Amino acid sequence: IIKSLAVFLVFAVLIGYFATEFNQALLWPLHTVAKNFPDITTKLGTLSPMEVFNMLIQLCVFGALFLAGPFILFFIGQFVAPALTEREMKAVLPMCFSAMVLFVLGAAFSFFLLMPSAIRVAIELNNAFDLETRWTAGNYYSTLTWLVLGAGAVFEFPLVLILLVWLGIITTAFLRKYRRHAIVVIFVISAIVTPTPDPFTQTLFAVPLYALYEISILVSTRVEKRRAKVV
């Protein structure tokens, strides 16, 4: 706990010290999309004296959590490792590594694809209704945080399915049988995570999720075979 807290505080302080540079990096989706809309200003505003402080806290807290995540997982693994058997270690270590990779992939997918798509749709709708774009820093970073962390968390679902198969709670036959139901659930999750109601952004998020579902079936098949050999 102390190591995890120390790493978190180090990253939070670093982000706070380089806050302006970190802020510019996080504005990449907005600046990228705005190039196609010359009339749109990319300068965000605030509506209250405290909003800039809330923005800074968001940058430090969520940025530090994201950057410190791999280290925290490593420290948790170090703490739990002595209590695990060799067989359990062989299962847990790849699971932890996969969890970290999937979270980063989900966060990157959201930052580089979903967020720009959501911004583009929002700008086009504003233009269609002849509305002036007046986005605040609080609005932008709340949306960015929800999308990046939400996508990172949702990308973990294949591991949950594989774990359930490994524990014998569900089977790959079950996963194959309920493919259609899974597609519906995936689109519901996409509708919840994506901030815009347009079908393009939701589909953009749903496609990789379904691909991960199929990959989880393939991996679960191997897990079942190994589990059967052990039993």
Image (cartoon, rainbow, N blue to C red):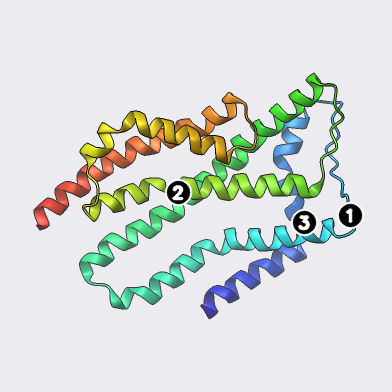
Compare marks 1 and 2 and give the one earlier in the sequence: 1
For the point 37% across and 45% down, the residue is: 158
Mark 1 vs mark 2: in front:
1
Considering only vertical position in the picture, is 46 above or below 213? below
Q: Which mark is residue 40?
A: none
Q: Nearer the viewer, residue 77 or 129?
A: 129
CA separation in Å, label 3 and label 2? 27 Å
Q: Which mark is residue 48?
A: 1
Compare marks 3 and 2 and give the one earlier in the sequence: 3
Q: Does residue 59 appear left or right of residue 210 in this picture?
A: right
For the point 49% across and 35% down, the residue is: 188
For the point 65% across and 50% down, the residue is: 145
For disc 2, the marked residue is 102
Q: Nearer the viewer, residue 57 or 33?
A: 57
Q: Does residue 170 appear left or right of residue 210 in this picture?
A: left
Q: Position of residue 111 (x, y in %)?
A: 62, 42
Q: Which mark is residue 55?
A: 3
Amino acid type, residue under disc 2 in the picture:
Leu
Classify mark 2: residues with Cα within 10 Å, few (<14), some (14-19) or many (20+): many
CA separation in Å, label 1 and label 2? 37 Å
Amino acid type, residue under disc 3 in the picture:
Met
